[in-house]
Image (cartoon, rainbow, N blue to C red):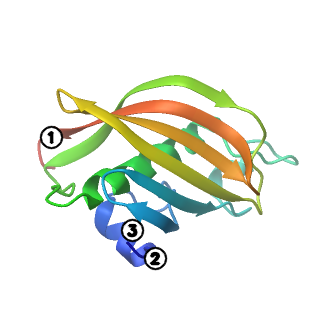
Amino acid sequence: MPELDIYQVLKYLPQRYPILMIDKVKELDPGKRIVALKNVSANEPHFQGHFPGRPIMPGVLILEAMAQAAGVLVFSAEGAARPDDRSVYYYVGIDDARFKKPVIPGDQLELEVTFERSLRGIGKFGCVARVGGGVVAEATIMCSLRAVDPL
């Protein structure tokens, strides 16, 4: 499948600024593997407090970017229902999260997410985040699509 630009990414994710963490999809094998990009910019709101004078992207936001890439991966699969106002794609678990190097403004975060399996509606994904080809974080995440009451 060809690359997805931001407008195509927005069709798969309900998140919007300031929590949208995927700018582009570089590679996509629907339902199997995705490589997505997040351009880390100094004007993102979390950098005002994390940390003033020495901004570092919070690890929890790197994990969020992984989950969003997993969401695009899942919802890109043929016949997959996309999230709507009656459903949310939730985190249900994070295992073996490791942060190896800080991510700073100006970096381009590359997120590689591979679908491992689905059991009782819970998807399991292997995730690796890289900057400049070097691993900065990795984790195994579990996510599930759940119905919610509309607002």
Asked if residue 7 is positioned above or below residue 135 in the image, the reply reads: below
The residue identified by callout 1 is 148
Marks 2 and 3 close (CB-CB < 8 Å): yes
- Name the residue rendered at 39%, 77% in the picture: 7
Q: Amino acid at mark 1?
A: Val
- Name the residue rendered at 17%, 26% in the picture: 120
Neighbor class of circle 3 (other Cα within 10 Å; few <14, some 14-19, many 20+) is many
Neighbor class of circle 1 (other Cα within 10 Å; few <14, some 14-19, many 20+) is few
Q: Quadrant of residue 147?
A: top left
130 relative position to 2: left or right: right
Element on which disc 1 rests: loop
The residue identified by callout 2 is 5
Determine the CA span between mark 1 and mark 3. Answer: 22 Å
Q: How far from the left and from the top, in percent, is residue 39?
A: 64, 64
Asked if residue 56 is positioned above or below residue 24 in the image, the reply reads: above
Element on which disc 3 rests: helix
Q: How far from the left and from the top, in percent, is residue 150?
A: 12, 48
Q: Quadrant of residue 118?
A: top left
Foreground: disc 2 or disc 1: 2
Q: How far from the left and from the top, in percent, is residue 143?
A: 33, 35
The residue identified by callout 3 is 9
Q: Amino acid at mark 3?
A: Val
Determine the CA span between mark 2 and mark 1. Answer: 29 Å
Determine the CA span between mark 2 and mark 3. Answer: 6 Å
Instruction: Judge by depth and name the residue closer to the eye, 54 or 106.
Output: 106
Q: Amino acid at mark 2?
A: Asp
Q: How far from the left and from the top, in percent, is residue 58?
A: 66, 40
In the drawing, what numbered circle is on residue 19?
none
109 relative position to 17: left or right: right
